[in-house]
């Protein structure tokens, strides 16, 4: 038996768009929230539950060569550009490829701020993992800074997401 | 379809493989970087004269060269990753994800199952994410990013 949440009418047919008695819209009532499995964990777990990678932060005034060397030495694909504790931009491998190209050597002394992507898309530690996936997929990003208020506290990459998905899908993915 | 089942049974060809961008082994690195920029691709495959796959050059390699301020006039052959990991058109999505996370790759050449030197496509980690998002829209898209904000003041006040 399905009850109408508005008037208590008890002869609802599953999937009906409106209640026969009170004619209230019922379209939301029959959407089932996933109860288990990966779909449920995506809606339950927050970004804060993913393994945290302390982001590597630099100031906007550092030189390009310094930034590139940091990325290679630390084996990271992306730097956060921070000014007075506020996130102002992001510099990724893709930015390096697209904005520098073959002339990289001549640009080594220039400040990083000229080549970064300003105002990057971010997620909050309280956002659900599904939100992070959504933002990555929509924007085509591989990295998202994780913010606690104004401060970046972590950086998640698309690989963390894939690992999360395979770990939570229960299959050994092999 | 169920998520678990889907990863284990869906072919990796559903992860939106792109047409591979290929160069010959003798091409200069600077030319390859230009080609990557023009195609906005993060990885390029390197072929020998017989058009067999012998290596991959990615934006990570490019970054390393840029950081070193290295001379980019040499042939791509000298800086590419040789004998790259690959998947075949018969691999499953789960196998592709596993190969990527084990090796730390974001791109995998997709080769013909009968001839592993014949590249038919290039899989990007974003393609896999796109597949997941498009096949599980209820989970990913039907979620408000933030709860509806409350206005601090009564309207008109």
Image (cartoon, coloured by chain):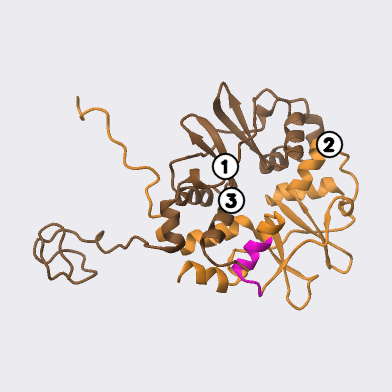
Locate the N terminus of chain B and report the quarter of the image it occupies.
bottom left
The residue positioned 67% from the left and 32% from the top of the image is A115
Label 1, on which residue? A52
Residue lying farthest to the top in this orientation: A84
Kindly indicate which chain is depicted in orange in the rendered structure: B
Q: Is residue B67 magenta?
A: no
Q: Where in the figure is residue A46, as x and y percent of width and height? A: 45, 47
| Residues in magenta, as a range | B90-99
Kindly indicate which chain is depicted in brown in the rendered structure: A
Q: For the stretch drawn in magenta, what is the main secondary structure? A: helix
CA–CA distance in space, label 2 to label 1:
29 Å
Q: Seen in the image, is B7 located left or right of residue B144?
A: right
The relative height of residue A82 versus residue A50 in the rendered view (above or below) is: above
Mark 3 or 1: the one toward you: 1
Which mark identifies residue A160?
A: 3
Label 2, on which residue? B68
Earlier in the chain: of badge 3 and badge 1, it is 1
Of residues A2 and B111, the one nearer the viewer is A2
Q: Where in the figure is residue B109, as x and y percent of width and height? A: 72, 63
């Amino acid at each position: 038996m399905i009850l109408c949440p508005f008037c208590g009418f008890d002869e609802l047919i599953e999937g009906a768009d409106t209640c026969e008695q009170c004619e209230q819209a019922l379209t939301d009532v029959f959407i089932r929230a996933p109860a288990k499995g990966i779909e449920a964990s995506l809606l339950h777990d927050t970004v804060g539950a993913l393994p945290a990678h302390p982001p590597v932060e630099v100031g906007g005034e550092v030189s390009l060569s310094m930034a590139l060397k940091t990325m290679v030495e630390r084996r990271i694909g992306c730097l956060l550009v921070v000014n007075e504790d506020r996130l102002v931009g992001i510099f990724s491998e893709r930015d390096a490829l697209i904005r520098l190209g073959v002339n990289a050597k001549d640009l080594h002394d220039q400040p990083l701020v000229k080549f970064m992507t300003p105002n990057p898309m971010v997620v909050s530690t309280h956002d659900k993992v599904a939100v992070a996936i959504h933002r990555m997929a929509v924007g085509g990003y591989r990295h998202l800074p994780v913010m606690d208020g104004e401060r970046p506290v972590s950086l998640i990459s698309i690989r963390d997401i894939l690992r999360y998905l395979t770990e939570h899908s229960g299959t050994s993915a092999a | 379809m169920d998520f678990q089942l889907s990863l284990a049974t869906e072919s990796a060809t559903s992860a939106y493989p792109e047409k591979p961008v290929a160069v010959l082994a003798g091409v200069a690195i600077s030319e390859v970087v230009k080609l990557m920029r023009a195609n906005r691709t993060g990885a390029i495959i390197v072929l020998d004269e017989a058009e067999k796959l012998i290596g991959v050059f990615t934006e990570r390699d490019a970054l390393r060269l840029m950081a070193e301020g290295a001379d980019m006039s040499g042939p791509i052959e000298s800086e590419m990753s040789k004998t790259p990991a690959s998947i075949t058109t018969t691999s499953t999505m789960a196998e592709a994800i596993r190969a990527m996370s084990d090796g730390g790759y974001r791109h995998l050449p997709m080769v013909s199952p009968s001839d592993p030197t014949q590249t038919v496509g290039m899989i990007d980690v974003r393609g896999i994410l796109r597949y997941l998002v498009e096949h599980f829209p209820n989970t990913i898209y039907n979620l408000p990013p933030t709860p509806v904000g409350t206005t601090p003041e009564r309207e008109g006040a």
